[in-house]
Image (spheres, rainbow, N blue to C red):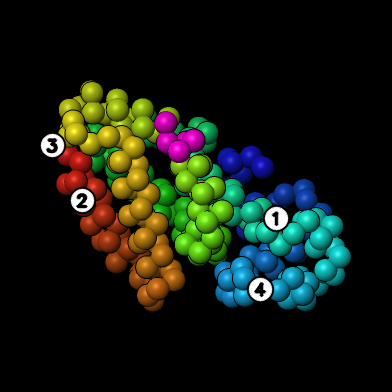
Amino acid sequence: MAEQQISQDFKAWVGASDMPAGKKKVVLAALRLFSEKGFDGTATKEIAIESGMSQATIFKYFKTKEDLLYFIITPLMKNIIPVYVADFKDAMEQRQNNLEALIHYVVRSRYNFLADNSEVASIMLAEILTKDKVKAKFIDMLAERGGDIAKIFTNLAEKSGEIRSDVKPEAVIRLIVSQVLVYFLQNHKIFEPRDQKQVDEDLAEIEKLIITAIKK
């Protein structure tokens, strides 16, 4: 699965992909049910009914229900820190001489990505909180991808002198990811969704908090 293809909207990617029509129906049905009822609360039979496919068809495409879950959430996990998506990395590098511009871009782009894929993101976060295997997979992906992004923050610290010397680049990444993920969870799962003006204000506060925590 090419990450560039799903960097904006998972459902649109599924619709435009060349996978068999039956597989598309299964994936989109599972997406709806997992986001509404949770992975553990959804039976394969329910996915079959929702998709209009038989359970045999589901297991033709996915050996287990867990395989179906990972097919849905893995692309989103990889794009939380999409170091292999050229436009994201280029945009970061263009802003690496200005701390505020860099934090603003990363916070907004990652929150908007999660919001555009709210169903998948909700499933992913629920499973990270409840399943050690999913959490470990997510942590491994962050560790794998964090190096290239950390270099950008290292360059920023060296060129602009804006970041405190005792703050490690990895800590900056963890701070940004945790703040964006928690805010998404609050806005899409815990509380009533806020309007765009309120979201903009909230994200500005998150940016300010991050900058205050790491700036000299």
Which residue type carries mark 2?
Lys
190 w.r.t. 21: above or below: below
Q: Report, in whole angstroms, how far the alpha carbon at label 4 lies from the one at label 3.
A: 49 Å
Amino acid beneath label 3: Lys
Q: Nearer the viewer, mark 3 or mark 1?
A: 1
Using a 10 Å C-alpha cutoff, classify the residue at mark 3 as few (fewer than 14 neighbours), some (14 to 19) or many (20 or more).
few
Q: Which residues are magenta?
A: 143-147
Circle nearer the N terminus (3, 1): 1
Q: Is residue 191 magenta?
A: no
Which of the two discs, 3 and 2, sits closer to the camera? 3
Q: Which residue is mark 2?
A: 208
Quarter of the image where one finds residue 147: top left
Q: CA distance from mark 1 to mark 2?
A: 40 Å
Residue 80, position in %: x, y? Answer: 47, 47
Residue 120 is situated, as x and y percent measured from the top left of the image, at 56, 60
- Answer with mark 4 or mark 2, whichever residue precedes in sequence: 4
Whether residues under marks 4 and 1 lie with C-beta atoms below 8 angstroms apart, the answer is no
Marked residue nearer the N-terminal end (4 or 3): 4
Q: Main secondary structure of the magenta part?
A: helix
Residue that numbered label 3 is attached to: 216
Task: Give the spatial CA distance, label 3 vs label 1.
Answer: 46 Å
State the residue position of label 4: 42
Disc sitting over residue 67 in the figure: 1
